[in-house]
Structures are given as C-alpha cells and as structure tokens.
C-alpha cells in the first residue's frame, strides 16, 4: 500500500476495554490498526487489571464518558469503520448503539466479548440480551468465539457442522453476517472459522498454529476486519485478510508472563529485520 501526503488516511475507531497486560482490548486494537496503516482512535469502556494469567479487577467508565469519547472522535475526525469489544454492561451498550445510529456509522464490527481466554467473565449477565437484540443487528459482521456462539445460538458446538448451524442461527437473530471463530475448538479445528451472510456459508481455514500464546486473537481479528473495511476492502475480503494477519501474528506470539502470552502484532517489522 502506498500512502503519500495527499492520500486520505483511513480512520478506525475501537470501543473497548483496556488490558493492562497489553495483549487484548484497546491495546491490541490500536496496534492492529497501526500495522494496517490505519489511524486508530478509541473510546474506552472500562479499565481491566489484567495480565497473561487473568483479570483481577474491572472498573467501568460511565456510559456518558463512553458517549463523549465517541462524539469527540466522530464529530471532528470522522471514522471509516468501527469495532466494539468489551462493552461490559447494558448502559454502555445502549449509548454505543445510539451513537452508531445517530452518526449513521456503517462498517460496524461487533466482537461480542463475554469471557476472557483465562476464563474471566467480561460482561454483566443482563447485558447479553441487549447485545443480542440491539447491538448485533446494527453490525455489518458479528464475530463470536465458540463460547459466545453457544450462548447466542443456544446450540452446543463441538464440530464444524455445529459451527455452521450456530452461524445460521445467529444470522437469523438479525445479524447481517456472522463469523463463528474456532480458536476455542480442539486440535486442527482451532484454525477454522465459519462465515455466513445469508447466502454464502463458507469454512475459512488457515493452519492451526501450535501455541498456547493466543491472548488477544479475537480482538486482533475484529480490529483487523475494521481496519480492512476502513481501507475500502469488501466485507468478505476484509475478513479473510484479517484472518491471515491473525495467523501470522500467532506464529510470532510473544512468550511473556506465566500464562497465555499475546499474539505478535509487529511481525511485519521483525520480518524486515530478519
Ligand atoms: N491456534 C490457532 N491456530 C490458528 N488460528 C487460530 C488459533 N487460535 C485462534 N485462531 C484464530 O484466531 C481467530 C480468533 O479466534 P478465537 O476463537 O481465538 O477468538 P476469541 O476467543 O474471541 O479470541 P480472544 O482470545 O481474543 O477472546 C480466529 O480466526 C481463529 O481461527
Ligand atoms: C479488555 C479486554 N478485552 C477483551 C478481552 C478478550 O480477549 P481474550 O479472550 O484474549 O482474553 C480481554 N481479555 N480483555
């Protein structure tokens, strides 16, 4: 990609939580935007005290503070794509939905974050129904992992066929397009995602990367989809390119901390120096 001084720099917005360990959330999203040559902006929903072992504390921002951040960014800079991650509660989700509607924000990627890799709950119980009924129907694409897809579809997911059924069910709930992610499956299925947009039902397969350092894969994938949309790619191409970015980032995952380390977003720099 060539960017010169007259090119309009694409802008993406992430509405998500902070991960103090730098592996997921806002930190992963902004790095992902940067490595796609997209200017990253953010609206913070909450602050987590978190590392590779888990989440020890969560402090929510007020819904008004989240709305003010979105207004500040969209009202001045403008955005070409938006992703949502950890929104935590119903009040925050409600202002995000109303901001998306009032600014008429298209290119919305909803990552329905519910539980962390380490098993910590990242959403209030009462917020799941709101996510499902109000936010997901506004999205261009929703990207549940295995666990989230089970909750949203009400189906057990143990096979690719189950992932297909869940994608169809979640689509029928009002999502325009669905990507059921396979990172939480067993063995080779970890590299498999299932796409459904109402007509096209596709299995997207990359190699299974043999690592336990997978913290932030879902955040990185949804941020990369938003970055690709901001760059003007069509939705399906945005998703497949994003999946390839995550696969390579997994190969360069960082072995830091005592638990599950994060994916290596900056592999393009490393490859240049090798
Ligand atoms: N070991 C792996 N090998 C190859 N691809 C993987 C592996 N683990 C996850 N992925 C891919 O990473 C992407 C994110 O999927 P995953 O199911 O891990 O999301 P998630 O659980 O939401 O992630 P997060 O850990 O950020 O919550 C998907 O495209 C999935 O196929
Ligand atoms: C702030 C924040 N957002 C999202 C996740 C999910 O990511 P993961 O499942 O890799 O822990 C997280 N752990 N923390």
Image: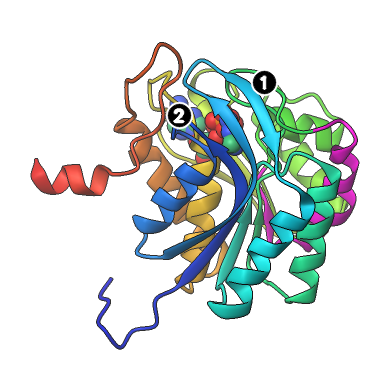
Residue 102, compared with residue 254, is above or below; it is: below
In screen coordinates, is 125 left or right of 269?
Answer: right
Ligand 2: give its quadrant. Answer: top right
Single out the residue that lies furthest toward the top.
258
In screen coordinates, is 105 left or right of 239?
Answer: right
Quadrant of the rendered structure where residue 255 is? top left
Q: Is residue 17 magenta?
A: no
Instruction: Determine the secondary structure under disc 1.
Output: loop
In screen coordinates, is 60 left or right of 231?
Answer: right
Q: Residue at x 64, y 23 (%)?
A: 57
For the N terminus, the quadrant is bottom left
Nearest to N terminus: mark 1 or mark 2: 2
Q: Which residue is drawn at 52% across and 56% down?
A: 225
Mark 1 vs ligand 2: CB under 8 Å? yes
The x, y position of residue 114, in whole percent, is 72, 33
Q: Nearer the viewer, residue 21 or 193?
A: 21
Q: Nearer the viewer, residue 49 or 12?
A: 49
């Amino acid at each position: 990609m060539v960017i010169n001084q007259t090119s309009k720099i694409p802008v993406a917005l992430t509405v998500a939580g902070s991960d103090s360990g730098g592996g997921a959330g806002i930190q992963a999203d902004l790095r992902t935007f940067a490595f796609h040559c997209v200017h990253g902006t953010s609206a913070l929903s909450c602050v987590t005290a978190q590392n590779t072992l888990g989440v020890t504390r969560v402090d929510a921002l007020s819904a008004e503070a989240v709305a003010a951040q979105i207004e500040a960014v969209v009202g001045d800079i403008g955005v070409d794509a938006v992703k949502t991650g950890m929104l935590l509660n119903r009040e925050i989700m409600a202002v995000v939905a109303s901001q998306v509607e009032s600014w008429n924000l298209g290119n919305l990627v909803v990552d329905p974050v519910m539980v962390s890799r380490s098993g910590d709950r990242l959403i209030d119980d009462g917020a799941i129904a709101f996510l499902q009924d109000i936010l997901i129907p506004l999205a261009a694409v929703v990207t549940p992992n295995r666990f989230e897809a089970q909750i949203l579809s009400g189906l057990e997911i143990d096979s690719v066929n189950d992932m297909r059924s869940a994608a169809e069910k979640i689509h029928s709930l009002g999502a325009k397009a669905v990507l059921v992610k396979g990172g939480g499956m067993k063995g080779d299925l970890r590299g498999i995602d299932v796409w459904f947009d109402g007509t096209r039902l596709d299995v997207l397969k990359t190699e299974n990367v043999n690592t336990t350092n997978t913290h932030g894969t879902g955040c990185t994938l949804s941020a990369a989809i938003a970055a690709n949309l901001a760059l003007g790619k069509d939705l399906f191409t945005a998703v497949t390119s994003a999946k390839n970015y995550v696969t390579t980032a997994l190969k360069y995952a960082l072995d830091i901390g005592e638990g599950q380390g994060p994916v290596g977003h900056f592999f393009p720099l490393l490859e240049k120096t090798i």
